[in-house]
Structures are given as C-alpha cells and as structure tokens.
Image (spheres, helix red, strand yellow):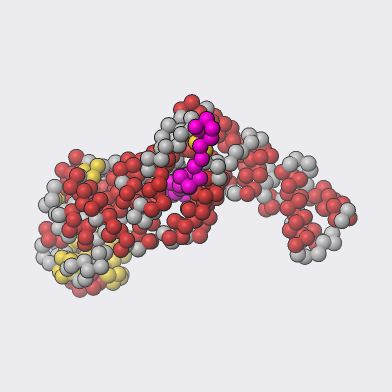
C-alpha cells in the first residue's frame, strides 16, 4: 500500500481541522489506485483561496493561479498545489474556460475533469469518492470521458492527445464512444499550441502501448504531422520488409529504447520513403536517398512543433545516419564517436537495433553485429582511447608554441593529427604529435 507523503496528509488535516473539505484528486489518485507511486499531489478543497491562505499562514504561500482558485503551499520545501472546488464556464477558445466560479460541491468540481480515471478524489483516511465510475474503468483498463465526450473535446482539444498518451503509457483501451468522438473532433487540435502538442507527443511515443496507438490513430496524429499519412498502407515491396512503412515505423518505435530522442528518431527515420520509392526490373522496391529526405521532413516537423535546438540536432543526426553502415573495427567506431558523441553513438545503435527488429526475421542476426559495435565502443571508452580533439594530447597553444600562427591553420593541423591517431598511424603522445606537426608544416 502506497503511503501519502506526510506533507500531503498534514495539508489535508489542517484544512479539515479548519472546517473545510479536502481531498487529493486527479492523477495522483489514479496512480495510487493502480499501485504506482505518484510524482506529485493535487489537493482540492471547499475553502476559498483567501481561506486557504489563512489556514496555511504559518507557511510560505505562492499565489500561482489565485484567480482560478489555486495557491501553492511550501511544506518542508515541498510545493503542494491546492485548488478550490470550481465549475468552469464555456471554453470559448477550445482550450481554456472563459471564467471559473467556486462551488462547495466536490461532485461539481470533478464533473469538469477529462476522464473518469482522473475524476476520483480521496481524503486523508483513504476513503475514495468516485462519482463517475473511474475506479471501475481503471479495473477494466478503459479510458472514458466524464459526461459527453464530444462536449469534453470541444471544451479542450488537448484532451484528444491526452487520451492517446494515456492509452500509450498505461496500455488502457479507449472506450468506443470516447474514441469515436476523438476522431470526429480531431481537427480541433489545430487550436492547441505546438508546445502542448509536442509535450503530449513525446510522452505518447515513450509509452509501452505506442505501436497500437500509432496504428489505430495515425489520422489523429496527422492533423499536426500530415507527412505521416503517406506511410499508411505503403507497400515496401522489398524482401527485407514484412510490413508497410507505417507498421514498420510503429514497430521500430515500440522496439526502440524509451528515450525521447531515440523514439522521435524512430518515428521519423523512414518518413521520407514514400517520396523516393522506385521499383527495379525484378519488381523489388528501393528507397535510395530516403535518409536525407526523411531528415528534411523531420526538420520541418520539429520546427513546426517548436522543439528545442539540442533535441532537434540529436534527432536529425540519428535520422540522417540511421541507414549508414558502420564497420566493426576500432577505427570505424572511433570515427563515428568523433562525429557524434558517446551518447549519440549508443542512441544510433539503439535505433539501428530497433530498425532491424522491424524488418523480416531472417535478417535478425544483425543484432549480434550491433552487440559487437557496442562492445568495441565500450573498449574504446573504457581504455580512454583518443577519438576527439578533447582527447588529443596537444592543443592550439601547443602548436603556437612551436611556431604555428593563430587561426585556420591550427584547426586544420589538429584535425589532421586526430585523423592520424584514429587511423593508428601515430600514438597519442604529445612530443610525437608536435614532431609530426612541425614536419608537415615544413613540407608546405
């Protein structure tokens, strides 16, 4: 049995001792029922915001959203969000209520929430208050809207993505009426900010049930990534592949490490295939140059969804290089480590592994090949072998000390020395490198 944090219990008891109702509500109760340790706790109360502030006058209180009834109380340095029971007015913009009004009814408060599993409340004694069958839906592993689904999604279209994300993460099925409403109202996602779509998409991709979601609801995802529509039903006509492009992609995402960068790259790695499909005289399909085309489509999508530059750079690197062969030698692995980074090298191998697992089983022996590449990289890193300029035993200052002029010449010489070390033509020793640099300089 999961125990509530002492700060949460204290907050609930203080509110009750002051004559108010108080409950934890939403995702924390859902997780509690499922036996999952909640990441954070939200409290709902009958106390008005000013009354809540009075109850916690001995603590630091931050008015995080006081006009919507929310304050944050710091208890033993832990922030606890406390919100007054409320009823939302109309959602004019399809995302936010035009106004809120406070109520003394817990039932009215939870009735405005998105899904039944998120509309359950619990008091400090562990008593459950479930007006809409959320606990039963959790037991049935079902995602169902509170009230009329069409109304819920018209109020806030982000709930469509939240449903898909919950399905992917929990493995729950979406209840039929709710699912139909999501598909009917999917175009409302155009009203949702790119940042919120991006956040839900990344969480969805990292879920255990992601393949099912991608296969069943690609048309919903296509509202903001229309480029994926072409993958649906696209026959690859190639002996390496047993799936169409979409099912291959969904399988690769599912098999990939649950790291956002890797799963994003898995989603996009073959998105350019339909645009470069050719068939040879034997009737075999080919996708020459699909890595480059997929990279450009990925760049466009990630810009549209306003990904940060670091994530974008890493995903684009993986998509571009996902199909590039890597020789199983220290020299070749060092070169890849140099071009990417240690982290990105292992991300690339993880993507290649997943890509292989999404192909015909007769080619699954490549997994042993990837094992060998990981083994070689591990040896290089463990032995602290040189594969980047930071590992080189000389730097720009060293070259200046032997007569090189500051500028482009130094960069080119350091790159040359690194290449020689990686190729095994010279040891990574300071004096030997300086001697070689002087010798090469004299030859020009």
Q: Percent x, y for residue 201?
A: 37, 52
- Residue drawn at x 16%, y 70% as measured from the top left: 101
- Residue drawn at x 23%, y 53% as measured from the top left: 184
Q: Is residue 359 above or below residue 276?
A: above
The span shown in magenta is 260-284
Q: Percent x, y for residue 150?
A: 18, 56
Q: Percent x, y for residue 81?
A: 27, 63
* Residue 393 appears in the rendering: no
Between 178 and 226, the residue placed more toward the observer is 226
Q: Is residue 360 above or below residue 247?
A: above
* Residue 234 appears in the rendering: yes
Between 101 and 61, the residue placed more toward the observer is 101
Q: Percent x, y for residue 98?
A: 21, 71
Report the number of numbered marks: 0
Seen as rendered, the residue at the extreme right is 442
Between 24 and 322, the residue placed more toward the observer is 322
- Residue drawn at x 61%, y 38% as measured from the top left: 326
- Residue drawn at x 51%, y 45% as measured from the top left: 276
Q: Which quadrant of the rendered structure holds the N terminus?
A: top left
Q: Which quadrant of the rendered structure holds the C terminus?
A: bottom right
Q: Is residue 353 magenta?
A: no
Residue 47, quarter of the rendered image? bottom left
Residue 190, quarter of the rendered image? bottom left
Seen as rendered, the residue at the extreme front is 281
Left or right: residue 171 versus residue 416 is left
Q: Is residue 276 magenta?
A: yes
Q: Is residue 345 above or below residue 158?
A: above
């Amino acid at each position: 049995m999961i125990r509530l944090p002492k700060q949460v219990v204290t907050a609930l008891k203080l509110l009750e001792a002051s004559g108010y109702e108080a409950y934890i509500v939403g995702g924390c109760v859902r997780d509690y029922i499922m036996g999952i340790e909640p990441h954070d706790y939200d409290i709902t109360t009958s106390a008005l915001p000013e009354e809540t502030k009075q109850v916690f006058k001995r603590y630091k209180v931050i008015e995080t959203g006081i006009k919507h009834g929310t304050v944050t109380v710091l208890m033993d340095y832990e922030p606890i969000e406390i919100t007054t029971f409320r009823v939302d007015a109309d959602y004019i913009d399809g995302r936010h209520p035009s106004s809120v009004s406070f109520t003394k009814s817990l039932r009215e408060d939870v009735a405005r929430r998105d899904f039944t599993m998120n509309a359950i409340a619990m008091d400090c004694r562990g008593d459950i208050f479930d007006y809409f069958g959320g606990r039963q839906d959790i037991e049935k592993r079902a995602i169902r809207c509170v009230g009329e689904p069409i109304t819920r999604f018209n109020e806030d279209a982000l709930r469509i993505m939240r449903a898909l994300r919950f399905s992917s993460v929990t493995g729950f099925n979406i209840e039929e009426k709710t699912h139909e409403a999501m598909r009917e109202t999917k175009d409302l996602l155009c009203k949702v900010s790119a940042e919120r779509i991006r956040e839900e998409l990344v969480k969805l991709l990292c879920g255990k049930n992601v393949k099912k979601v991608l296969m069943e609801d690609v048309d919903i995802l296509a509202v903001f990534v229309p480029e994926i529509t072409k993958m649906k039903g696209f026959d690859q006509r190639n002996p390496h592949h047993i799936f169409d492009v979409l099912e291959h992609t969904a399988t690769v995402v599912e098999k990939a490490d649950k790291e956002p960068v890797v799963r994003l790259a898995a989603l996009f790695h073959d998105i350019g295939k339909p645009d470069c499909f050719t068939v040879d005289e034997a009737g075999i399909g080919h996708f020459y140059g699909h890595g480059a085309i997929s990279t450009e489509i990925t760049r466009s999508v990630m810009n549209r969804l306003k990904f940060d530059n670091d994530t974008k750079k890493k995903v684009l690197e993986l998509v571009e290089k996902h199909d590039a062969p890597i020789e199983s030698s220290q020299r070749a692995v060092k070169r890849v480590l140099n071009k990417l980074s240690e982290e990105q090298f292992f991300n690339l191998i993880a993507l290649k592994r997943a890509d292989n697992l999404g192909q015909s089983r007769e080619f699954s022996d490549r997994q042993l090949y990837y094992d060998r590449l990981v083994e070689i990289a591990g040896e290089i890193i463990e032995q602290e072998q040189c594969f980047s300029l930071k590992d080189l035993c000389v730097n720009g200052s060293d070259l200046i000390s032997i007569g090189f002029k500051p500028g482009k010449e130094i960069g080119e010489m350091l790159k040359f020395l690194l290449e020689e070390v990686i190729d095994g033509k010279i040891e990574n020793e300071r004096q030997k490198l300086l001697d070689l640099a002087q010798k090469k300089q004299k030859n020009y």
